[in-house]
Amino acid sequence: MLVICGPSLAEAGSQPESDVVVMENNMIAAEVARSSGAITVIEKTTGTRWGGDPWDREVGELALQGGQQGGLVTCGLSRARDIVIEKLDDRSIRCVFRGLRGANGQESAESRVQTTLRIQEDPSEVIIQVDEVTPGPGWRFKTLHYPLRQFAAKTYQDEGYLVVPLGRDGYLIPSHHFPYPAPNFWIREDYSRQLALECTSLSMPWFGGRKGESAFIATLEHPADASLHVVANVNRWGQAYRAGREPSEPRILSGSVIWQASRGEFRYPRVLRYRFLPQGGYVEMAKVYREVARRQGEFVALKERVAQNPKVDRLIGAVLVGVYGGYPQHRHHPQMGFTYRDLQEMVRDMREDLAVPHAVINPWSIFGEQAPAFLPLNSRHGTLTELRSAVEYTRAAGYLFAPYTYYSAYHQESAAWNPRLEFRDGAALDSEVGKWSRACPSQFVGLAESYIPEMLRELPVDAVWVDIVTSGSVRECAHPDHPMSRQDDIAARRALYEYLRRQNLVIGSEGHKDWIFPLTDFAEGPGPRGAGIDGIGIRTPLLPLVYHDALVSYTFCGDSYNAQVLGGGDYNLKSLWDILCGNPPHWHFNVEDYDYWRPFIKQSADVVAAFAREIADQEMAVHEFLSADYQVHRTIYKPSGTTVQVNLSAREHRLSPCTVLKPYSFRIETPGREARQGQYSYELLPQATRQSRQP
């Protein structure tokens, strides 16, 4: 049973003066309503009023499991039996909600939620801390959505956007209309879902919003047990439809945090920091988080990495070449095969004939056993001597040889099968999806210790690429031999990378999660596949604005940078985006297809990878959209002042009276150098006209 309660269908408005408790500084004033606990913040520089939940005037929802009926009951905090709002001093307010109850009348008489709001001067922040969640006898804490739908913008009324660092780059979700560069514009109309912070989606634990000339960034402390709820320009049309009525709520755009139980309990305080930025936007938000990452030790500059391990220099500006060959479970598929001699010949051709100066060779399926076992090495592709020769040749060419490795994938038919290694959450894990994350992270270091030393004795590799570990969900394990919270899960994954670093390896990971960035040197992986945000959000380089000079970042081979138009992986547009972001290119294929991709590899190495190496240690200081459809971009890097302008659309864009950015083109301007520019050709012309054109 799921009951959502609270006053229905009313918009939040200003509370009477006598009903609010106020604290303020020179930049902001925060109000808390005595009757409901509703929170309002006035950002003084622009006069912007950031209010609470526009739908129910509800400050939060507590989900409890149990009671007489044993179901899930969601209780509105603003409907609690007792609400006490107490000003502790000039800079802090305590809120206590007792006797929480659902709309069906069920009440946990001894339930209690306590929060504390604090205001800070420099930087100007409102800090919201959940101090206590007591569910009461017979009830179990599940989630607390607090503050609920806070600081929302009204769709098509408020000019603004929500900022979500999802996937490899990030997204803006505008609240206003803009020319949508695709025929499937209806995707933007109805979308509301919950996105998991730190687990499968967000690369950094923050989000932000802009309304008019004011903005905020919200950062989470210890976000393993939290998720981000996004309402993206919708109302409750689904509920209204089922009730046979028109929806009366406004369409809104909001992001708010749902705090999750940790192994069935509240366990520790939860903290959310809102910093307000007058005249600010997503770039300023990213720069705020860049400083947070520095303070927390998540930011390790590439210069520092090279000083710690000189082999990292071979990674900078390197073309990433994934040689598929199949997962081990495809070992009998004839078209997934390659020989180690083929692999060495490909490397020779890249280095000597194509003159590619820097590359990472990432072969899959050099191991002969099903996951999680690595060894013995795969003899179907050739002898150990031939594999060792390919590795040594790759290193002599100045490249990195980074074999695919796995720790979370776990196959029951493997010789290493041991039920004690399993992750358990009470659900069946014998599906294809389950195989990829079936091993519990608490076992990762033990698995690595079983295989990595012998692999390094057999092969002189200087890098590894780790699959799934940082792209899969952060979870709680219920195995009786190794139970874990989500925080324990993250610690176990980090422990694997710490072990690999002690082997003096250059490390790559699938997925971009900043809790692993201090321990990994490059990251490659999927964007928000399945999250549904590609159709409603505008791809924005939030991650490079924070980490460009601290991490070598690659695309996912099947990820498109213009999914509204293409819906797939177009390497031309990827190359333009990588030039914009100063990232090297990524190619992934079977060896037998190398000749097909060979000219593209050469082209991307000469243009994309060379520029990425040139500015690898520079900060992306500025990003801006130059067109109303968000398809023309500009980035600026410092300290060089290099400016990159990219047009991802089929329309030309005039940069100045004398300079036009042609469709699918780029322009790089560096002080003291001649401008560099290029264009991909996408033309549909009659044959006679094409023949008459000058080259």
Image: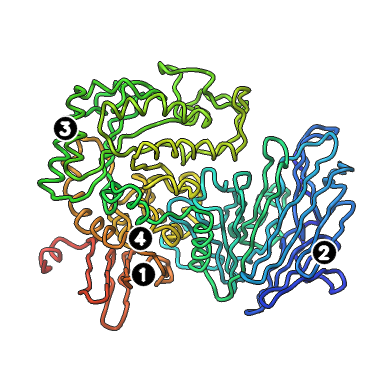
Residue at 33% from the left image edge and 52% from the top image edge? 307
- CA distance for labels 2 and 4: 47 Å
Is label 1 in contact with label 4 (beta carbons under 8 Å)?
no
- CA distance for labels 1 and 2: 45 Å
- CA distance for labels 3 and 4: 33 Å
Mark 4 sits on what residue? 581
Q: Secondary structure at mark 3?
A: helix
* Residue 121 in picture, x, y percent from top left: 66, 71
Label 2 vs 3, first from the N-terminus = 2
Q: Is residue 305 visible?
A: yes
Mark 2 sits on what residue? 88
Q: Residue 501: which quarter of the image? A: top left
Mark 1 sits on what residue? 638
Q: Is residue 245 above or below residue 327?
A: below
- CA distance for labels 1 and 4: 13 Å
Label 2 vs 4, first from the N-terminus = 2
Label 1 vs 4, first from the N-terminus = 4
* Residue 102 in picture, x, y percent from top left: 82, 45
Q: Is residue 60 left or right of residue 293?
A: right
